[in-house]
Image (spheres, rainbow, N blue to C red):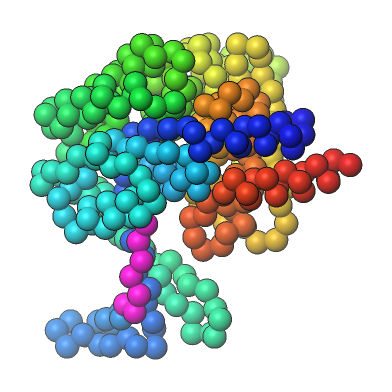
Amino acid sequence: MQDKSRLDQLLEKFPSLHILVVGDFFLDKYLSIDPALSETSLETGLEAYQVVEIRHSPGAAGTVVSNLRALETQVSVVGVIGRDGEGFDLKQGLIQRGVAIEGLIETPERFTPTYTKPMLRSTTPGGSERELNRLDIKNRRPLPADLEAAVIAQLDRLVPAVDGVVIADQVQERNCGLITDKVRAALARLAEQYPEKIFVADSRVRIGEFERVIIKPNMHEAREAVGRWEDWKVGDYAEDDGLVAARACGEALFAQNQKPVFVTLGAQGILVVTEDGFEHVRGIPVSGEIDVVGAGDSVMAGVVVGLSAGGTAAEAAFIGNMAASITIQQIGTTGTASREQLHQRMKMVDEDRR
């Protein structure tokens, strides 16, 4: 990104964009525990934690949604949730953010995936909370065929009306989340059918299985997709050279899929591989305490809106880096970055360049 005026041109387009987020929507549920109020259970003799505050927000694919809405982009969703209390809370969180949820399928056959996070308050005045063992609710059985068909029908209905599609594949167990093998194939079909639309996929364990869509792996996911280091040829590349390894992985994934690859490298930024070659888009330096939870989702939001607004791959990566540099400074929460915050961060970048 050469200057602030170019960024402003892209930022101005964000509110006119419509992005579809398809994937695994979790509820992030936080239980704030006050240790000073702990009791002893009469039945078990064990300590009974006392919850004094409950808060929740859309998680996993929902975190990408929150980032997109902070950028003032219109958002629709496709997902499957349970007809349960967690599903109600998740829907309310999406509605409060101004998200179109007509593509969200409710069913008594499934749990609403939930990350329950007990948070132990510090006994020191003004101290922070500490997360205890997380309680995960996930679906351990494959998505039924009728729900797969319903998801694909929603995609066929909604994709023609949007500018970009985010694919959030969160569940590690094959075919137990929303992005099953059949749904992934349907997304590849739609990407081919609508080449003018931006499709970007993120996946914890199957990023190498996506076809005809842009992919955004981190370095670990990229290397797992390509294979063990000794199983593929990298010429004279050194294994401990992170950028060289990222280039090798990115080029291998691009050769396989023929779509741009954004390999995220944490503080080092993003290595972008396209048909024009590779480019290292450096991260935005920040000082002080940081919290990297949700940084990848901030990058995803920045990349998809940057591309959908007409930016180059390098420009989209820069926007993703800026968004992440803002959210990681929001401690103890899964943060977001607004258009105004991006505008102000660009001013700082310009000043640092002088």
Of residue 291 and residue 93, the one placed in the foreground of this image is 93
In this picture, which residue range is highlighted in magenta?
A: 51-60
> Image point 32% across, 41% down: which residue?
100
Quadrant of the rendered image containing residue 23 = top left
| Quarter of the picture holding the C terminus | top right
Query: How many marks on residues?
Result: 0
Q: Is residue 282 visible?
A: yes
Q: Main secondary structure of the magenta part?
A: strand
- The answer to whether residue 295 is magenta is no
Please name the residue shown 58% across and 23% down the image. 310
The N terminus appears in which quarter of the rendering?
Answer: top right
Q: Position of residue 211 (x, y in %)?
A: 40, 16
Q: Nearer the viewer, residue 124 or 199?
A: 199
Residue at the right extreme, as displayed:
354
Residue 60 in sight in this render: no
111 left or right of 1? left
* Image quadrant where residue 249 sits: top right
Residue 325 in the image: x percent, y percent? 64, 48
Residue drawn at the location 52% of the way across and 51% of the way down: 336
Q: Is residue 156 above or below residue 139?
A: above
232 to the left or right of 170: right
Q: Examine the image and state in which quarter residue 246 appears.
A: top right
Which residue is at a point 68% across and 45% down the rendered structure image? Answer: 343
What is the x, y in percent for residue 165? 41, 28
In the rendered image of this protein, does residue 41 appear above or below residue 109?
A: below
Q: Is residue 320 above or below residue 116?
A: above
Residue 236: percent from left, percent from top: 70, 17
Q: Is residue 57 magenta?
A: yes
- Foreground residue among 161 and 245: 161
